[in-house]
Image (tube, helix red, strand yellow):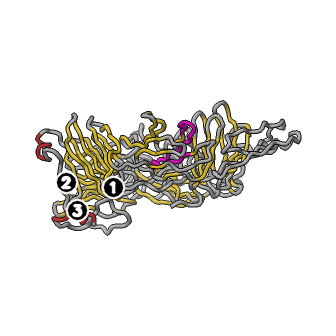
Amino acid sequence: MRTALRTAIATAVVAGVAITPALAAGAAFAADGPVAVKPAAATSVTATQAGTGEAAKAKAPTTKAPATTAPKTEAPKTEAPKTAPATKVPAATTPATGIPKTEAPEADAAAGEGTGTYIRTMTLPNGAKAKIFKVGSLHFRAELYKQGQRVGTLDADGIAVAGNDDGTFLALFPNGDAHTWRGNHVPGARPGTYELANGSRVELVVQLGRKYLKAGGQVIAAVNGARQVTRYGNAVIVMEPDGGLAAYIPGSATQAAPRLLVTTGHVRTVKLANGAEAKIFKVADGHHRAELYQQGKRVGTLDADHWSVAANNNGAFFVLNSDGTSYDWVGNYLPGAKPGQYKLANGIRLELVKKDGRYGIQEIRLGVGTGVSYLKGDRQVFQFTGGGLVVLERDGGLAAYIPGAAKQSAPMPYTRDDACTIHTEVGIGAGTKAELTMSPNGPTATLRDIGSDKQVYTTLDRKHPSLPKSAGIIARIDNPFSATPTLYTKVEGGTAKGATHAFPKMLKGCTLNPVKGTSTPVTGTNGNTGTRGNTGVTVNTGGQTSVVPRGGVAAGAELGTESPANSTALYATGAGAASLAAAGLGFMVLRRRAADSRA
């Protein structure tokens, strides 16, 4: 899934975790990962785009630069400036762990896109170069080059940052310390306790949809949508958005990836949002179990045997995946939803259908259904590739959760404005595509990496029609308040020409909504004079759908009817489900009955 053009995303996304994009060269400093439909440990690494163009040259100081001293295992080679007196500087030995060669400032060292004093150049294990600049107190910047082309930037402004180029890591700290290595990486690490090469232990946990790294009972790092880097003792640890872990021990000849200790048996106890507790146990690979407790009493069990399962305690939801990860939330629930189309808080569009008394669900992508998955039993979990998590109840009730997102809500009905919204995609070069959307509320443009489909820049719309200069490329919406806006992009430097892309036209009968603060619609419509009235566009709020599945289908999907032998069963421990309901504890738990139900 990786492309040759992936690079780390930049400063605009998460403060301090930035590899400023500039699209054109051939390296990939990556971040973020996808959601699996059938839960398993995530393995993908997402990428952002790399930059082109050499930076302008800046005259470096001609005074003698001091030799750089580093721990034995990093032992960079330091050379005196070319303009300084010919004083021999001893070279240190670089160990096999991929410690960079460090060069002292040169008279013609390249200056960065911002201010700063050139300090040194590091050679990464994959042959890439990192030019380090001091910008200010506790502020250093590394410009990354591959095959002579600049491919990104790390900006450590008061906080440590890190880049990942297909397993080659560079960690930069605000005091100018920098470490690079290749490997020592566990992609999509499962929750559990890990031992580092120096013998210290850290714990990867998931709570309320967020991933945390703990040591000694204290949180030392938390992923909030972007890569994090931290120090624990003498270890440098990088934590990826998908839970992946990489570690490096400066000064040590022994290097290794974090090692997952035995987790069969009790893995962890999770405090749920409603005050209940879930004790999670590992049964085997791809099989975890959760015992649910409320007020100290055991009220149910979830058994995730190669499938995700869910519990609903009066609107408090708990989802257990087969790899041991879990999510819990309160609300975001639409009981007894009627068949029709809905959208999630992150914009994912889905359709709820009912056939032969059974409810089913499918995702709608670019107006096309991906295939209906029908409910088995009383409750089922569906995970969508766009990042949405949905629990479907027997009565058609829908609960939704967007892991890691600040914006949460129950599924909302798909509206007239939604029906008038149309999308298209165009390539803009350098491994990047633009998703162009035209709606009654105007145009939006989302730039994504072609290989990973991850967003790489801020979404453009009427309020923010262009990217800032710091983005490294030009992208802007021209005429954003008209019915015929266009997107102008220029991803290469120098005299290269840009390109103009037309937004798709809305369906006949659709009009632009009035701009907020005015009483009249925006002028310029598709096929009429701009009045709203009856547009002739209708939204399907019922009926049945028969669509041949395309691509991945949610976990547990089955088209058509099912035999009684393949149905799911409600069960609970202790006094049983009936007693639980009578006691008002409300945990209704699902479990796969037999292996043939997974066929």
In primary-sequence order, the first of circles 2 and 3 is 2
Q: At 18% across and 48% down in the image, what residue appears?
A: 572
| Residue extending furthest toward the top | 137
Q: Nearer the viewer, mark 2 or mark 3?
A: 3
Q: Circle 3 sits in a helix, a strand or a loop, which is it? A: loop
Q: At 52% across and 53% down in the image, what residue appears?
A: 447
Which range is magenta? Answer: 230-247
Residue for badge 2? 378
| Residue extending furthest toward the bottom | 548
Residue for badge 3? 594
Q: At 18% across and 56% down in the image, what residue appears?
A: 569
> Residue 498, can we see it?
yes
- Viewer-proximal residue, 214 or 58? 214
Label 3 near label 2: C-beta < 8 Å?
no
> Residue 478, can we see it?
no
- Viewer-proximal residue, 367 or 165? 165
- Viewer-proximal residue, 543 or 164? 164
Vertical placement of 409 versus 175: above or below? below
Residue for badge 1? 284
Vertical placement of 173 versus 486: above or below? above
